Image (cartoon, rainbow, N blue to C red):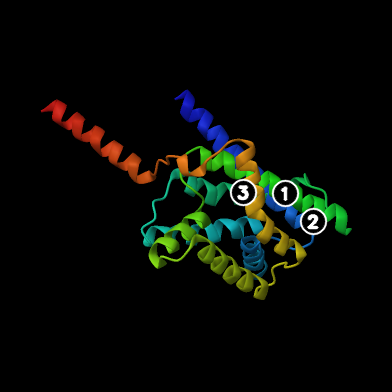
Amino acid sequence: MKKIGLNFVRLFSGYFLYALGIVMAINANLGIAPWDVLNQGIGNILNITIGKASILVGFVIVLIDIYLGENVGWGTVFNMIFVGIFIDLIIASNLVPKFDSFIPSLLLILAGLLIIGFACYLYVGAGYGIGPRDGLMVAITKKTKKSVKFVKNTIEVTVLIIGYLLGGSVGIGTAIMSICGGYFFEFVFKLVNFNVAEVKHRYIIDDIRFIKEKLREKKEGEV
């Protein structure tokens, strides 16, 4: 139980830091990452916060992941819900300053990317499933047999265009986050000696099987 508790602390710390990195990019006012452009655009159209839009988009993506046969963990579901909640809370608290000049804004974006890298290390390393958007990338890669890079770029370009047409913020910050994001992740993962391929995830289906097995054993024990 202690291990589970520590893993959940790690999981939710990761979600908070991920949301913090997103808000830092938003407040830099130089353009935001492709998925956040989509969230912002949908938020503008539906007149809801970007956090609520993130939850809505995440919910749709989780359904698509399940339809495509990708395993979903509790961490996937929590990611869908709590990153959006934390985004709205951080924005409402004015925790992150806003900048109008280029250099401070650029530094804010770069710091945000570094924080997002650490956030991914925390929540992915907890082993409760990857985020909905990463799950979509994996599922489409399996179905199409295309490279991960091709699928990731195709998805991000698609959501970027849709988000831009819906009124999302696109700028040099969008290009920086799209191009440099992978390098920041790699830097952080090397810094903490983290190999994402070695993480063994526990999925919701595993818990369902576990419960069924325990019920079966209990039923057999009563016979």
- In the picture, residue 37 is in which quadrant? bottom right
Q: Which residue is mark 3?
A: 85
Please provide percent x and percent y for residue 25: 74, 55
Q: Is residue 37 above or below residue 28?
A: below
Q: Label 2 crowding class (10 Å Cα cut-off): few <14, some 14-19, many 20+?
A: many
Provide the residue designation for mark 1.
Answer: 112
Mark 2 falls on what kind of element? helix
> In terms of sequence position, does the residue under pointer 2 or pointer 3 come before the other?
2
Q: Earlier in the sequence, mark 2 or mark 1?
A: 2
Question: Disc 2 and disc 1: Cα gap in Å?
Answer: 10 Å
Amino acid type for the residue under numbered disc 1: Gly
Which is nearer the eye, 70 or 96? 70
Up/down of 89 relative to 44, above or below = above
* Marks 2, 3: nearer the viewer: 2
Look at the image and tell me whether residue 123 can be seen.
Answer: yes
The span from disc 1 to disc 3 (Cα, nearest Å) is 18 Å
Say which quadrant the N terminus sits in.
top left
Residue sitting at x 45%, y 44%: 74
Q: Position of residue 174 (x, y in %)?
A: 71, 63
Q: Please say if the residues under marks 2 and 1 sit with CB atoms less than 8 Å apart.
A: yes
Please state which amino acid type lies under the numbered disc 2. Answer: Ala
Indicate the quadrant where residue 207 lies: top left
Answer left or right for 98 relative to 187: right
- Disc 1 on helix, strand or loop? helix
Which disc is residue 28 wearing?
2
| Residue type at numbered disc 3 | Ile
Distance of mark 2 from mark 3, alpha carbons? 20 Å
Name the spot of residue 17 as percent of width and height, x first: 66, 43
